[in-house]
Image: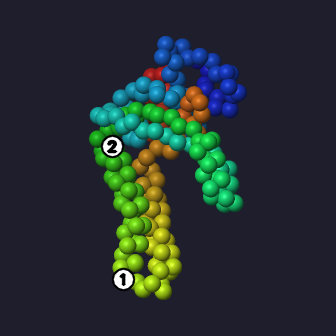
Amino acid sequence: MPAYNPYAPPGAIEPSARRDGAFASELGNALIVSKEAPLPDVCVKCAAPSTTRRKQQFVYTPPWVFALMIFSLLIGAIVAMIVQKRGTLHLPLCESCARRWRHANLQMLLAALAIPVFLIFGVMIGSASDAGIIVAVAIGLGLVALVAVAIVHRDTRLQAKKVDNVAITLLKVHADARRAIVAALS
C-alpha cells in the first residue's frame, strides 16, 4: 500500500488493503494514522508492551486562526470552532507512561484552577482601589503557572500536528512504536 499523503486532494487516498480501512505510515518523525485505528499493544511513548489504553481525542486548529485572534478574539474563537478538526484514538500505554500522562493532566488542571484562587485571595487581601492591579497580577500568575506546567510536561503527551477527515498526524511517538504501528496496520 502506498504511503498516506496528507496533502493529497480528497478522494485521492487509495483504500487500504485491510478490511477495516485502518492504515498508518511514517513521515519523518511523525506518525500518520487513520482515525479510530486499532493500534497494537505497544506503548506509544516508550515502545514497551502496553498494559492499558487511553481514549484520547486530538483537536487541531490551523495556526492562522490564532493570528486572527490577535485582531478579534470573538471572531477568532468562532472561526476556530468552525475550522478545527477532531479525531480519536485508543492509545496503548504502559503503566509508567499512563501514570505520567495522568499526573501531567492533573497538574494542568491545578494550574488552571490557580487563576480563580489567586483572584479570590487577591480580593480578600487587597483594597477596592487596587482591584485592577490585583486582577492583572492574579491572571498573570495563573498564566505563568499554566505555561510552566506545559513546558515541564511538553514531552509527556502526544501532539497532533494535523487532523483531517481521514487521519491524525502525531508527533512525539516513540520511533520503535511508530514502526510497530505501521507494521501492524500495513
Percent coordinates x, y for residue 59 in the rendering: 52, 42
Local SS, label 2? helix
Tell which of 46 and 22 is nearer to you. Answer: 22
Please give the name of the residue rendered at 30% of the width and 47% of the height, measured from the top-left corner.
99
Q: Is residue 63 above or below residue 41?
A: below
Lateral position of residue 5 relative to residue 182, left or right: right
Element type at marker 1? helix
Q: In the rendering, at what x and y percent does residue 52 appear?
A: 31, 35
| Disc 2: CA contacts within 10 A as few (<14), some (14-19) or many (>=20) | many
Identified by mark 2, the residue type is Ala
- Which circle's residue, 2 or 1, is located before the other in the chain? 2
Residue 138: image location, x then y, percent: 45, 73
- Image position of 70 with respect to 22: above or below: below
- Residue 60 visible, this angle: yes
The 10 Å Cα crowd at callout 1, few under 14, some 14 to 19, many 20 or more, is: few
Q: Which mark is residue 125?
A: 1
Q: Quadrant of the N terminus?
A: top right
Please give the residue where the numbered disc 2 appears in the rendered image.
98
Look at discs 2 and 1 and give the one toward the viewer.
Answer: 1
Give the residue type at disc 1: Ile
In this image, 169 relative to 46: left or right? right
